[in-house]
């Protein structure tokens, strides 16, 4: 498996012979409004041209409809007939954007040898959950590949913890920027990311969704320093830079 972080939550995965694009936000730097009053968003450029990002993509996964996960540029530039997985309830919006070959992730979807399963996610706590709306996580499994648990735009909360314990994934992808909405955490921060790493000692954690939006409260350096202080090895917590590709292998005997 190869995982390439492009920016924020946008990943390009080479997995079991397929190329998956996850949560495409393809807008230019500073092309959208500020969230926290600090800067327009996204705060950084994409690391490569959109043509390169879309090259070879077999399947797109859109976890929810916030602009930093599926923006207007993505809706325009991604081929309308590409196979696309969305969360249940987003079908009409996906159709309205012109896409014709989409499927909601009700329980599981197969992409060739890959099984994609829906997993719980919650975009904050308390009243902010209704403001943020529904989101989803998912797992990926395929013969000869590491199992992946993609947490999505979620805080660490009991259903997610229980799902991770049940899945026993080899790789966990977190959104770890500590984004805040009116002072309420809406994705994992450093503490929650490291708590999850300790709860799933078999897994390699890949922290993403960092240093791209102005309501973030945790930098890559701050997350690394927090992990070092808690004794979490650098090879267990990977914090890729934008444009960086990570290779991850299935455990021996898997």
Image (cartoon, rainbow, N blue to C red):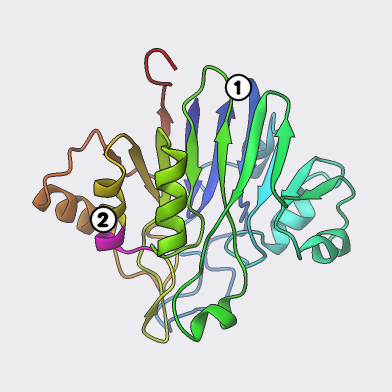
Residue of label 2: 195
Which picture quadrant has residue 166?
Answer: top left
Residue, x 63% and y 51% (percent of image)? 24
Q: Secondary structure at mark 2?
A: helix
Q: Which residues are magenta?
A: 188-192
Residue, x 72% and y 63% (percent of image)? 72
Is residue 225 left or right of 176 when viewed as pictured?
A: left
Is residue 26 left or right of 75 when viewed as pictured?
A: left
Question: Dot 1: few (<14), some (14–19), or many (≥20) neighbours within 10 Å?
Answer: some
Indicate which label's residue lies in the foreground, 1 or 2: 2
Query: Residue 207 location in percent, x, y?
Result: 36, 48
Residue of label 1: 16
Q: CA distance from mark 1 to mark 2?
A: 30 Å
Residue, x 20% and y 50% (percent of image)? 224
Which picture quadrant has residue 169?
Answer: top left
Principal SS element in the magenta part? helix
């Amino acid at each position: 498996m190869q995982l390439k972080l492009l920016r924020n939550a946008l990943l390009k995965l080479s997995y079991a012979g397929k190329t998956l694009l996850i949560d495409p936000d393809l807008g230019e730097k500073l092309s959208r409004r500020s969230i926290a009053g600090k800067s327009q968003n996204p705060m950084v450029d994409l690391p490569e041209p959109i043509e390169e990002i879309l090259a070879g993509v077999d399947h797109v996964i859109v976890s929810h409809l916030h602009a930093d996960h599926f923006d207007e540029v993505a809706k325009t530039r991604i081929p309308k007939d590409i196979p696309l997985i969305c969360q249940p309830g987003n079908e009409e919006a996906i159709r309205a954007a012109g896409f014709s070959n989409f499927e909601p992730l009700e329980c599981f979807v197969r992409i060739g040898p890959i099984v994609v399963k829906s997993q719980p996610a919650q975009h904050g706590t308390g009243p902010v959950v209704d403001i943020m709306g529904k989101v989803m996580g998912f797992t990926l499994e395929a013969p000869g590949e590491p199992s992946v648990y993609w947490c999505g735009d979620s805080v660490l909360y009991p259903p997610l913890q229980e799902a991770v314990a049940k899945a026993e994934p080899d790789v966990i992808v977190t959104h770890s920027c500590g984004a805040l909405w009116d002072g309420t955490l809406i994705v994992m921060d450093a503490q929650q990311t490291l708590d999850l790493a300790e709860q799933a000692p078999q897994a390699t954690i890949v922290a993403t969704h960092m240093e791209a939006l102005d309501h973030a409260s945790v930098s890559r350096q701050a997350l690394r320093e927090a992990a070092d202080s808690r004794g979490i090895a650098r090879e267990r917590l990977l914090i890729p830079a934008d444009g960086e590709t990570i290779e991850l292998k299935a455990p021996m005997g898997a």
